Image (spheres, grey):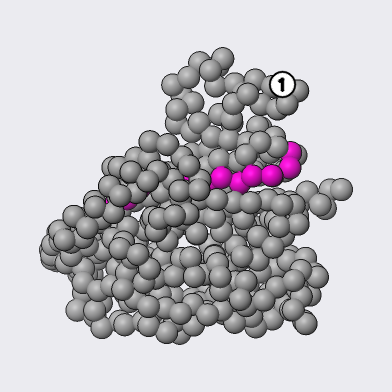
Amino acid sequence: MSGSSFGKAFHITTFGESHGEALGVVIQGCPPGLLISEDIIYQALKKRKPGNGPASTSRKEPDKPKILSGTFNGKTTGTPLTIFIENKDANSKAYEKNAAIFRPGHGDITYQAKYGIRDFRGGGRASARETAARVAAGAVAQIILDTYKIRINTFTISLGGIHAERIDPGIGDENILLCPCKDAAQKMLKRIKEVKKKGDSLGGVVQICASNVPAGIGDPVFDKLDADIAKGLMSIGAVKAVEIGAGINASQMTGFENNDQITKKGFKTNNAGGILAGISNGDEIVARVHVKPIPSISIEQDTIDEKGKAQTVSTKGRHDISAIPRINKVCEAMMAIVLADHILRQKTLV
């Protein structure tokens, strides 16, 4: 299958399906001598694993990673690093009765069109379960970023139409939705309960911020840093739009309003989101992703089967109500992977 790899200098290839034996990632280009352990990767996976929070699926996966290659005596060797994660709680029975039916909002109909065959068990390769491998790779990427003191934080700034009126990073760590506004977080939790009772789902917006990124990272024209960030974030299954800095609001500004004026102390504003001409400017990198509602809902919907016959479907099984906040860690991982990739590319030029 093409399309399972990402990056150039820090190159990852993920493998596995939602209800297969396991999934994982092979990382090429990881520098030698980095201190690494399975626990470091596990701590990252814990933040996205299923079964946590009111919006999460009841599927319980331990997500204990196993490093199969690329390390010796607790350090990376510079050879391909392989991380393996077993599926321990896959239950495919709930999908069997609808095996020939295309679920609205899922990749069932497009995978069938492309390959002529598809894994109907939880979406197979198209499942959000694949993102566990990205988070594992992101944990390794963060080890590289740690040497530059680069930190990445994510916040839930909107969920189910409820928006955070302010961003207080400290508050984001205090609630399970990672919302930086206490009042908004409480309203979001209430909204989740209301929608869950109806058998429906919710979408929202996640903001990703990377601090201490040095100026000069990124390549011109087709390999712009913001272009690769957008691609990395857009490759996450539930993401439907990506903004950098002022994003769509920039189209409503004048040039004077949008330009970040420069002083001896730095930029007065950050409408550029820390990136100018595809290259980091030393300011905080800010991106936002717009996440669609989970397509697996128990409300009956119209569809067709593999023979084109009209059907109705109500998706039963263990599903999230919203990809948020589990997707937050995936966004963080993809940002880390892109930054590590571009930093290693830059080192080859020095």
Q: Residue 304 falls in which quadrant of the image?
A: bottom left
Q: Is residue 104 left or right of residue 152?
A: left
User: Does residue 273 sit above or below 346 in this rendering?
Assistant: above
Residue 262 drawn at (x, y percent): 69, 22
User: Does residue 57 sit above or below 302 in this rendering?
Assistant: below
Residue 231 drawn at (x, y percent): 54, 49
Q: Residue 14 falls in which quadrant of the image?
A: bottom right
Residue at 84% x, 48% y: name it.
Answer: 349
Q: Is residue 213 inside the magenta stretch?
A: yes
Residue 314 drawn at (x, y percent): 16, 67
Q: How many numbered discs sit on the rendered protein?
A: 1
Q: Is residue 295 left or right of residue 124?
A: left
Q: Which residue is mark 1?
A: 263
User: Does residue 63 sit above or below 164 in this rendering?
Assistant: below
Residue at 69% x, 81% y: name it.
Answer: 69
Residue at 59% x, 30% y: name it.
Answer: 270
Q: Is residue 189 left or right of residue 49?
A: left
Residue 216 drawn at (x, y percent): 75, 39
Residue 340 shows up from this direction: yes
Which residue is the extreme one toward the right? 350
Residue at 68% x, 50% y: name it.
Answer: 150
User: Does residue 32 sit above or below 97 in this rendering?
Assistant: above
- Dot 1: element: strand
Q: Which residues are magenta?
A: 202-215
Q: Is residue 65 inside the magenta stretch?
A: no
Residue 105 shows up from this direction: no
